[in-house]
Image: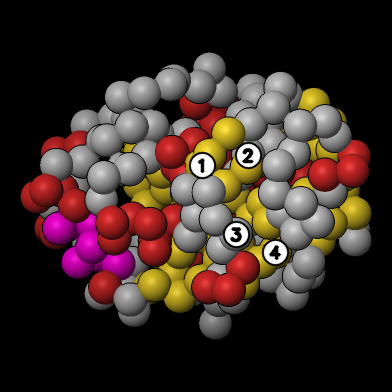
Amino acid sequence: MVPADPRVLVFTKTTGYRHASIAAGVAALADAFTIDATEDAAVFTPENLARYGVVVFLNTSGNVLDDEHRRALAAYLAGGGGFVGVHCAAGTENDWPAYDELIGARFDRHPEVQPAVLHVADRDHPATAHLSKTWEHVDEWYDFRTNPRPHVRVLLTVDESTYAGGGMGDDHPIAWCRPYGQGRSFYTALGHTIEAYADPAVRAHLAGAIRWAAGQD
């Protein structure tokens, strides 16, 4: 029996750069799942988090949780909860060392928004199974401070020869996943633009990520 889709907590608090695409992202996720969207970190309590199959950090930025909230999220994940970070989630909670492991790699820099070719490194995953081997997409292509590959399952890479300003070289992961505690963590750098959330391929990517994080693979 296939389990029902998870209830999803979509967290969009920002204390740094605020993406204009947040509302579009929330709407796209609401089309696919039962969600509660909030910018109130007070929802991060053990009792409240227990209501959700997955927590999504959707273009969060800066430090958005206090120590109590961090402990609640860590306990939720240790107990089997799922996490999905979207785009600027890699630029969030920069002074929380445990978040480094959760997100996989930290945002460093990016060139201007432009088209690029993505290579699907792993099609045996709900977030990438719908894609062909290559995919052209317009986004803001993040460089990361470190390459996460030794510690994660890489799903998508971006081909730096197809756009200007990339700084990670021939191996440039852009979406990945990993076990985390008793749960699962997924990150995708896609999702800067408003238009991305109207793209069926991006919507399927995010929906597959959430279902995987909830253990539905």
On the rendered structure, is 32 left or right of 53? Answer: right
> Seen from this angle, which residue lies furthest bottom?
1
Q: Badge 3 is on which residue? A: 147
Q: Verify CB contact (< 8 Å) between mark 1 and mark 2.
A: yes
- The CA distance from mark 2 to mark 4 is 15 Å
Quarter of the figure with the N terminus? bottom right
Label 2 environment density (alpha carbons within 10 Å; few <14, some 14–19, many ≥20): many
Mark closer to the chain start, 4 or 1: 1
- Which amino acid type corresponds to the residue marked 3 in the rendered image? Asn
- Secondary structure of the residue carrying numbered label 1: strand
The reply to whether discs 3 and 2 touch (Cβ–Cβ < 8 Å) is: no
Q: Which residue is mark 2?
A: 142
Residue at the spot 62% in from the left edge and 42% down from the top edge:
143
- Residue under the point 57% across and 47% down: 144
Residue 19: x percent and y percent? Answer: 50, 22
Magenta segment boundaries in residue numbering = 71-77
Tag shown at residue 155: 4
**Dot 4: element:** strand
Circle 1 residues within 10 Å: few <14, some 14–19, many ≥20: some
Q: Main secondary structure of the magenta part?
A: helix
**Looking at numbered disc 4 in the image, what kind of residue is underneath it?**
Leu
